[in-house]
């Protein structure tokens, strides 16, 4: 008779006396307990898988949302870079900018000339003994 493994119908037929009955009951109790352990493990695995699936679904949805938002932001960046390039190109070569650059050059020349005049005046005053 197989006590540790599942009993076959031949094993059950061999049990004829009442003395073997408690052994048979104990065997089936053990088998029931093992199956309950397996069922408990299966339920635990099922719950874990369902939770993981839910998490994966949420992350996939979030990933799609973030990807769409990222795409929109990239489009905005490209648009802004294009506008900036246009503004720079137009601003640098515009007639107004050319006039301002010319004026800045003239002011720098005037500043150098005035600085030289002030320096010469200070030198003359030193030579005259005023300072």
Image (spheres, rainbow, N blue to C red):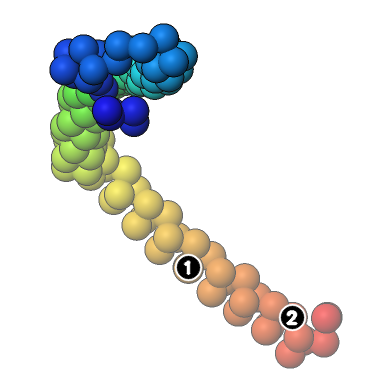
Nearer the observer, 126 or 64: 64
Please name the residue that numbered disc 2 is placed on.
125
Q: Residue at image x 83%, y 81%?
A: 131
Q: Residue at image x 44%, y 15%?
A: 19
User: What mark, if any, has residue 56 been given in the picture?
Assistant: none
Q: Whole-percent x and y of residue 117?
A: 56, 71
86 relative position to 45: left or right:
left
Nearer the observer, 105 or 30: 30
Location of residue 66 (image quadrant): top left
Location of residue 14 (image quadrant): top left
How many residues crowd mark 1 within 10 Å: few (<14), some (14–19), many (20+)?
few
Nearer the observer, 43 or 77: 43
State whether residue 33 appears in this view. Answer: no
Please name the residue that numbered disc 1 is placed on.
113
Task: Examine the rendered structure and indicate whether residue 98 appears above or below residue 13.
Answer: below
| CB under 8 Å between discs 1 and 2 | no
Q: Residue at image x 34%, y 57%?
A: 105
Nearer the observer, 82 or 100: 82
Q: Residue at image x 16%, y 17%?
A: 10
Q: Whole-percent x and y of residue 38?
A: 36, 20
State whether residue 20 appears in this view. Answer: yes
Q: Element under label 1?
A: helix
124 relative position to 5: left or right:
right
Q: Quadrant of the N terminus?
A: top left
Task: Examine the rendered structure and indicate whether residue 82 appears above or below residue 33.
Answer: below
Task: Please tell me whether mark 1 or mark 2 is closer to you in this view.
Answer: 1
The CA distance from mark 1 to mark 2 is 18 Å
Q: Whole-percent x and y of residue 92?
A: 22, 43
């Amino acid at each position: 008779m197989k006590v540790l493994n599942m009993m076959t119908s031949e094993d059950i037929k061999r049990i004829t006396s009442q003395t073997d009955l408690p052994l048979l009951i104990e065997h089936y109790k053990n088998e029931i307990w093992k199956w309950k352990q397996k069922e408990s493990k299966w339920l635990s695995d099922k719950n874990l898988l369902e939770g993981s699936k839910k998490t994966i679904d949420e992350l996939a949805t979030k990933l799609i949302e973030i990807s769409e938002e990222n795409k929109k932001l990239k489009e905005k960046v490209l648009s802004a870079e294009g506008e900036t390039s246009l503004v720079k190109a137009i601003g640098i070569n515009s007639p107004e900018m050319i006039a301002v650059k010319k004026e800045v050059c003239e002011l720098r020349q005037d500043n150098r000339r005035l600085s030289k005049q002030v320096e010469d005046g200070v030198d003359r005053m030193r030579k005259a003994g005023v300072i």
